[in-house]
């Protein structure tokens, strides 16, 4: 169990520039009723451990400096618009943004909306250190990590379960916290990683082709149809796209479709048939086979496994 109350913990890690804190008290615009102190002691320094976490809600604009100290601060914006800034970079995010502030660092956060809700978790552990070091190898993630996700309902449901588990005084609750954290803030970060980024020297026709595949994945594309639309020989299109992105265009299209299918499976109650149609694979048998080839599970098993993650710990789950 932690030695600081949740109010003292926030006071230690958040310095409010606007509105100013009076007599070392937290500003009245901050609601921490749904922010919790972990009721279980930190006994295993390998597994992820959430010392404090839950919902921070602001009912007016704020400007605060955050000192992360020995923790990684993982957040998800469910309402509002904020700016996060370091000495080296600044970015603005709103609903659906997942972000991670690294330990032993200082960040400035500003909100630009009357109501801002941030699901915030202060996490430590050797497993988290290892993952973050891997994350920081990407030049885009040197100072912090941020990414937008469309799986709002699923994320909120999972975070609500984490918040509930933080209040449990059982060992099983502690392990479930760790499991859910790894899913939401580690595994989930890979859901949309199939989209290729960071290529700045792509030719115009390759860029146009990629945009078609990224945004119109629900259409029945073939090399012949792409050739007709772009006015270039299909063999050249395939060669240039593969040379630029190290993947053939139709194979890339399939990864985009499977990524979107994962989102729809977790964030909607649509049937497998409806999801197959939505991602451009109306043949349900073919969709199931393609999904299983990509993930190792059928769409139904994938949905069942991940939706039930917060209710029970699957025997097959490995930390």
Image (tube, helix red, strand yellow):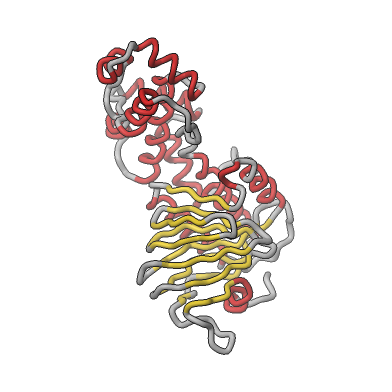
Q: Residue at x 54, y 87 (%)?
A: 22
Residue 228 falls in image quadrant:
top left
Answer above or below: position of 205 versus 147: above
Q: Name the image quarter holding residue 67.
A: bottom right
Query: For the point 32% across and 44% down, which residue is it?
Result: 269
Residue situated furthest bottom in the rendering:
23
- 99 and 86: which is toward the camera: 86
Position of residue 236 measured from the top left corner of the image (x, y, whole percent): 39, 12
Q: Quadrant of the N terminus?
A: bottom right
Q: Judge by depth and name the residue closer to the eye, 142 or 76.
A: 142
Residue 275, x across and y down, in percent: 31, 34
Determine whether, in the image, residue 156 is placed left or right of residue 103.
Answer: left
Say above or below: 56 vs 8. above
Residue 283 in the image, given as x and y percentages of width and height: 29, 22
Q: Position of 42 compared to 163: left or right? A: right
Q: Residue 208, position in %: x, y?
A: 34, 27
Near-viewer residue (189 or 302): 189
Relative side of 141 to 45, left or right: left
Between 281 and 130, the one lying in front of the other is 130
User: Residue placed at 49% from the left, 37% from the top?
Assistant: 193
């Amino acid at each position: 169990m932690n030695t600081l109350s949740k109010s003292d913990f926030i006071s230690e890690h958040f310095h409010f520039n606007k509105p100013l804190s009076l007599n070392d008290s937290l500003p009245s615009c901050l609601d921490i009723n749904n922010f919790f102190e972990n009721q279980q002691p930190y006994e295993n320094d390998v597994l992820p451990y959430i010392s404090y976490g839950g919902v921070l809600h602001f009912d007016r604009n704020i400007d605060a400096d955050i000192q992360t100290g020995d923790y990684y601060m993982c957040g998800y914006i469910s309402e509002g618009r904020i700016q996060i800034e370091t000495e080296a970079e600044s970015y603005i995010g709103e609903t659906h943004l997942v972000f991670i502030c690294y330990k032993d660092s200082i960040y400035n956060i500003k909100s630009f909306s009357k109501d801002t809700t941030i699901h915030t978790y202060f996490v430590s552990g050797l497993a988290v250190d290892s993952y973050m070091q891997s994350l920081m190898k990407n030049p885009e993630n040197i100072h912090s990590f941020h990414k937008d996700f469309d799986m709002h309902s699923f994320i909120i449901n999972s975070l609500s379960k984490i918040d509930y588990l933080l209040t449990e005084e059982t060992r099983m609750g502690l392990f479930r916290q760790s499991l859910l954290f790894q899913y939401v803030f580690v595994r989930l970060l890979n859901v949309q990683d199939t989209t290729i980024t960071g290529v700045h020297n792509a030719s115009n026709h390759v860029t146009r082709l990629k945009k078609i595949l990224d945004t119109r994945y629900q259409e029945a594309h073939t090399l012949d149809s792409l050739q007709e639309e772009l006015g270039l020989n299909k063999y050249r299109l395939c060669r240039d796209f593969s040379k630029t992105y190290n993947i053939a265009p139709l194979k890339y299209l399939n990864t985009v479709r499977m990524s979107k299918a994962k989102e729809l499976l977790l964030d909607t109650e649509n049937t497998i048939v409806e999801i197959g149609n939505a991602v451009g694979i109306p043949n349900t048998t073919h969709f199931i086979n393609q999904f299983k080839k990509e993930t190792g599970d059928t769409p139904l098993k994938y949905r069942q496994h991940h939706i039930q993650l917060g209710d029970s710990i699957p025997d097959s789950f490995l930390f």
